[in-house]
C-alpha cells in the first residue's frame, strides 16, 4: 500500500478556490413610459427543485441566512471511497469541508481522481478494493484516522449545509454511538421521492469508530454494526451521480452479480427464519432495520415473478408514477435489475 498524506489544518478545511467575481451589469435606461404589465397566468408551475438543499462549501452563498459550521471546525474524519470518480470527487470533498480531516481511499483510479482530491487538500490513501464492507473497515481502523467520529460519504454524494450544521450541533450532545440519515437519490436530473426508495433510505453514516465495525466477510453490504444507540438526523444526504446513465447501468450489472452470488449461498428459509427470531431475542447491533431484513431474507425470496411484482410495487403501490418520466424509468430499470439477478442466479445452478 502506498500512502500519500496531506493533512487538512484545523479550522481551515480543504483549500477551495474562490469563485471569480461577477462582471457588473450595464445600466439600463428607464423607458419613457411604462407599458402595462402582462396579466399573471392562472397557474404557475413550481420549479422541480424549489427549496432544494444547498451544498456545503467554505463560502456561504450570497444572501444566505442558513448557518453553517466553519471550515474544518467539526472533529470528524470524512472517509470517501473512490474509483474513477473524477466527475464527482471535487464536489464530494467540498461538501465535507466542515470536517477537520477528509480522507479519500482510492482503489486504483486511472482518470485522475486521486490528483483532483489531493489538489484541493484531501488526504489520499491508495488501497486495493476489499469489498464494500471490507474497504470501510480498513479505512475506519487505519492509524492515520485522526478522530473517533468518522463520516462515510460516497464519491457521488454531497453534504448539504443543513446536514453539516445539524451534525456539528448534535455531535457529542447525546449518548449515541452512531447517527443515520436518509438519502435523496437524484436520477436523470430528478429527485426520486417515491417508489419506496426515499422512505427506506435510512443509513448510519456518522459512526463512533470505537464502538462500530463493518463485517468484512460480507461482500455486498455496507451496514455498520454498532454497540449503542443510533440517533436520527433530520437533514438529508444527496445522492447525485454526474457520470451518466451508462455508468449507472454498468454499476448495477456489477451489483446484480454480487447479489446473485449472495442468493446462491444463502441458507434455506427455515434457517433464515431462525436467524430473524434470534435477532429479535438478542439484537446483534446491525444498523439494518429488522423489517428490511425480514423483507429481503424471508418474504422476497418466496415471491414469484419478481421483476413484475417489484415494478408494480414500486410504480403503483409506492407511487413511483408521481416522479414523472424519471420515476417510470427508475422502476423499469429496477425491474430489469431484478431480472438480471434472476438470470445470473439460474446460470450458476445450470
Image (tube, rainbow, N blue to C red):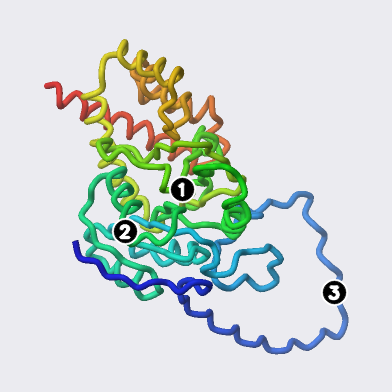
Report crowding for label 2: few under 14, some 14 to 19, many 20 or more residues within 10 A (C-alpha): few
Closer to the camera, 143 or 304? 143
Q: In which quadrant of the rendered image does the C terminus lie?
A: top left
Query: Which residue, given by chain and number where applicable, does mark 1 sit on?
Result: 208
| Point 51% across, 74% down: residue | 12
Q: Residue at x 52, y 38 (%)?
A: 230
Look at the numbered disc 3 and give the secondary structure of its residue: loop
| Of the image marks 2 and 1, the number of the one nearer the N terminus | 2
Q: Position of residue 23 (x, y in %)?
A: 60, 86
Q: Secondary structure at mark 2?
A: loop
Q: Is residue 296 above or below residue 25?
A: above
- Give left or right: position of 55 versus 79: right
Label 1 near label 3: C-beta < 8 Å? no
- Out of 111 and 102, give the one closest to the viewer: 102
Percent x, y of residue 113: 30, 66
Q: Which residue is nearer to you in this view: 141 or 115?
A: 141
User: Label 2 to label 3, Cα distance in Å?
Assistant: 70 Å
Q: How many marks?
A: 3
Q: Alpha carbon of mark 2 to alpha carbon of mark 1: how far?
A: 15 Å
Q: Crowding at label 3, few (<14), some or many (≥20) Cα neighbours within 10 Å? A: few
Examine the rendering and report whether any part of residue 93 can be seen.
Answer: yes
Earlier in the chain: of badge 2 and badge 3, it is: 3
In the rendered structure, find residue 262 and report the number of the disc placed on it: none
Comparing marks 3 and 1, which lies closer to the viewer? 1
Residue depicted at x 27% and y 70%: 4
Could you say which is closer to the camera, residue 233 or residue 7? Answer: 7
Asked if residue 182 shows in the view, the reply is: no
**CA separation in Å, label 3 and label 1:** 63 Å
Q: Quadrant of residue 276?
A: top left
Which mark is on residue 143?
2
Query: Label 3: which residue?
Result: 35
Amino acid at each position: 500500500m502506498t500512502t500519500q498524506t496531506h493533512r487538512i489544518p484545523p479550522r481551515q478545511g480543504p483549500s477551495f478556490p474562490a469563485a471569480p467575481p461577477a462582471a457588473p451589469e450595464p445600466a439600463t435606461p428607464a423607458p419613457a413610459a411604462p407599458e402595462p404589465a402582462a396579466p399573471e397566468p392562472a397557474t404557475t408551475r413550481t420549479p422541480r427543485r424549489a427549496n432544494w438543499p444547498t451544498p456545503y462549501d467554505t463560502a456561504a452563498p450570497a444572501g444566505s441566512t442558513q448557518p453553517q459550521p466553519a471550515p474544518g471546525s467539526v472533529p470528524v474524519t470524512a472517509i470517501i471511497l473512490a474509483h474513477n470518480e473524477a466527475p464527482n470527487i471535487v464536489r464530494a470533498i467540498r461538501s465535507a469541508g466542515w470536517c477537520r480531516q477528509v480522507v479519500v481511499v482510492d482503489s486504483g483510479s486511472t482518470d485522475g481522481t486521486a490528483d483532483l482530491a489531493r489538489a484541493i487538500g484531501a488526504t489520499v490513501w491508495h488501497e486495493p478494493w476489499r469489498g464494500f464492507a471490507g474497504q470501510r473497515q480498513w479505512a475506519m481502523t487505519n492509524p492515520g484516522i485522526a478522530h473517533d467520529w468518522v463520516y462515510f460519504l460516497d464519491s457521488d454524494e454531497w453534504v448539504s449545509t443543513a446536514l453539516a450544521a445539524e451534525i456539528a450541533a448534535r455531535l457529542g450532545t447525546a449518548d449515541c454511538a452512531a447517527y443515520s440519515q436518509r438519502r435523496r437519490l437524484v436520477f436523470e436530473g430528478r429527485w426520486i421521492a417515491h417508489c419506496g426508495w426515499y422512505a427506506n433510505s435510512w443509513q448510519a453514516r456518522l459512526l463512533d469508530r470505537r464502538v462500530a465495525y463493518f463485517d468484512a466477510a460480507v461482500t455486498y453490504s455496507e451496514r455498520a454494526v454498532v454497540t449503542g444507540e443510533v440517533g436520527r438526523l433530520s437533514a438529508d444526504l444527496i445522492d447525485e451521480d454526474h457520470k451518466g446513465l451508462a455508468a449507472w447501468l454498468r454499476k448495477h450489472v456489477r451489483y446484480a452479480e454480487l447479489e446473485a452470488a449472495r442468493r446462491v449461498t444463502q441458507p434455506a428459509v427455515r434457517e433464515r427464519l431462525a436467524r430473524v427470531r434470534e435477532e429479535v431475542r438478542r439484537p446483534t447491533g446491525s444498523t439494518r432495520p429488522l423489517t428490511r431484513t425480514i423483507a429481503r431474507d424471508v418474504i422476497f425470496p418466496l415471491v414469484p415473478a419478481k421483476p413484475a411484482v417489484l415494478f408494480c410495487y414500486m410504480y403503483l403501490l409506492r407511487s413511483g408514477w408521481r416522479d414523472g418520466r424519471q420515476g417510470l424509468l427508475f422502476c423499469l430499470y429496477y425491474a430489469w435489475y431484478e431480472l438480471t439477478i434472476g438470470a445470473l442466479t439460474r446460470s450458476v445452478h445450470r
